[in-house]
């Protein structure tokens, strides 16, 4: 073996070792700073941990891009998935007057709100893109109540770390950490492009997270649970827990 190729092997080996220990160091630091996503799994989860940690540190308080009205996408949108379910159909037949979203868990005042009540709360309207992990996206104007307002009304306890949220569609629950829950663009959306939120887009109510991929934007929202752990809240999703964009 020539000196050159031996040196090459040694440096390559060193670089690989440095890379691996860099990851471990990164994960350890992330753990100390509360930057480990709940779906990490040891060293194999290092990629997800570093994505989460890096994005948290870089963009903690930053807003997703908002667009002018001229940029709103023309319907029909890329993917429209009509939804059927007996209790949903009953509520729909009644014009959604009986639709409610409940908030429970680590809150001082568990509560339940109708759409009419939600519409009385301070609203936020924003024109943002919804991007599916499958590679398509569209821009729409979304109007709703900031989740931070609902958490304030219910009195989320200081030790709360996550919000788990549920759809009337079984198996569609997801969860977010408090940074995303309190983010000003995180809203319970009941209107889109100036009209009621269409059925296909989650009407009458969905959670809209401008800084998260499509699948975290759960449609037909019925319940919010505030918690300090995600143990026991199993998500069926095979996608990463953290879907920051
Ligand atoms: N209840 C429910 N919420 C859902 C879904 C779903 O099938 N059911 N699909 C998710 C996915 S994968 C995406 S990309 C977006 C799509 O939103 P849209 O239908 O408004 O385009 O909704 C998300 N929320
Ligand atoms: Mo998606």
Image (cartoon, rainbow, N blue to C red):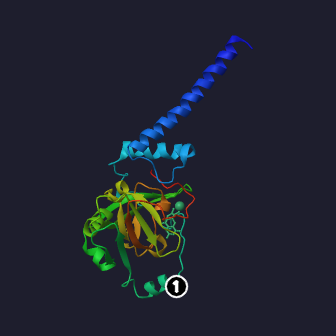
Residue drawn where x is 55% and y is 64% of the image: 236
Residue drawn where x is 49% and y is 73% of the image: 200
Which one is in front, 22 or 244? Answer: 22
Instruction: Identify the image quadrant of residue 144.
Output: bottom left
63 vs 170: above or below: above
Residue 235 in view in this figure: yes
Which one is in front, 9 or 80? Answer: 9
Q: Secondary structure at mark 1?
A: helix
- For the N terminus, the quadrant is top right
Which one is in front, 227 or 219? Answer: 227
Q: Position of residue 77 (x, y in %)?
A: 50, 65
Q: Position of residue 44 (x, y in %)?
A: 57, 45
Q: Position of residue 32 (x, y in %)?
A: 39, 42
Which residue position is annotated with label 1?
Answer: 86
Task: Report the number of numbered marks.
Answer: 1
Residue at the right extreme? 1
Which one is in front, 217 or 16? Answer: 16
Q: Residues within 10 Å of mark 1 (few under 14, many from 20)?
A: few
Q: Position of residue 9 (x, y in %)?
A: 66, 21
């Amino acid at each position: 073996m020539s000196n050159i190729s031996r040196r090459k092997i040694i440096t390559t080996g060193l670089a690989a070792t440095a890379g691996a220990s860099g990851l471990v160091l990164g994960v350890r630091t992330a753990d100390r700073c509360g930057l480990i996503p709940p779906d990490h799994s040891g060293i194999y989860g290092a990629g997800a941990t570093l994505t989460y940690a890096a994005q948290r540190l870089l963009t903690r308080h930053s807003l997703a891009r908002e667009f002018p009205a001229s940029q709103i996408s023309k319907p029909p949108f890329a993917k429209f998935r009509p939804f059927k379910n007996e209790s949903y159909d009953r509520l729909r037949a009644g014009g959604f007057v009986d639709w409610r979203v409940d908030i429970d868990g680590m809150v001082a005042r568990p509560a339940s709100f109708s759409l009419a009540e939600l519409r009385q709360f301070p609203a936020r309207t924003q024109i943002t893109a919804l991007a599916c992990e499958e590679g398509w996206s569209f821009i729409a104007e979304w109007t709703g109540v900031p989740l931070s307002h609902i958490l304030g009304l219910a009195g989320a306890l200081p030790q709360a770390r996550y919000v788990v949220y549920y759809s009337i569609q079984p198996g569609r629950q997801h969860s977010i950490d408090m940074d995303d829950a309190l983010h000003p663009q995180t809203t319970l959306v009941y209107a889109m492009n100036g009209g009621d939120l269409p059925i296909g887009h989650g009407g009458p109510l969905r959670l809209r997270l401008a800084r998260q991929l499509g699948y975290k934007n759960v449609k037909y929202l019925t319940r919010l649970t505030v918690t300090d752990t995600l143990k026991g809240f199993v998500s069926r999703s095979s996608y990463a827990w953290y879907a920051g964009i």
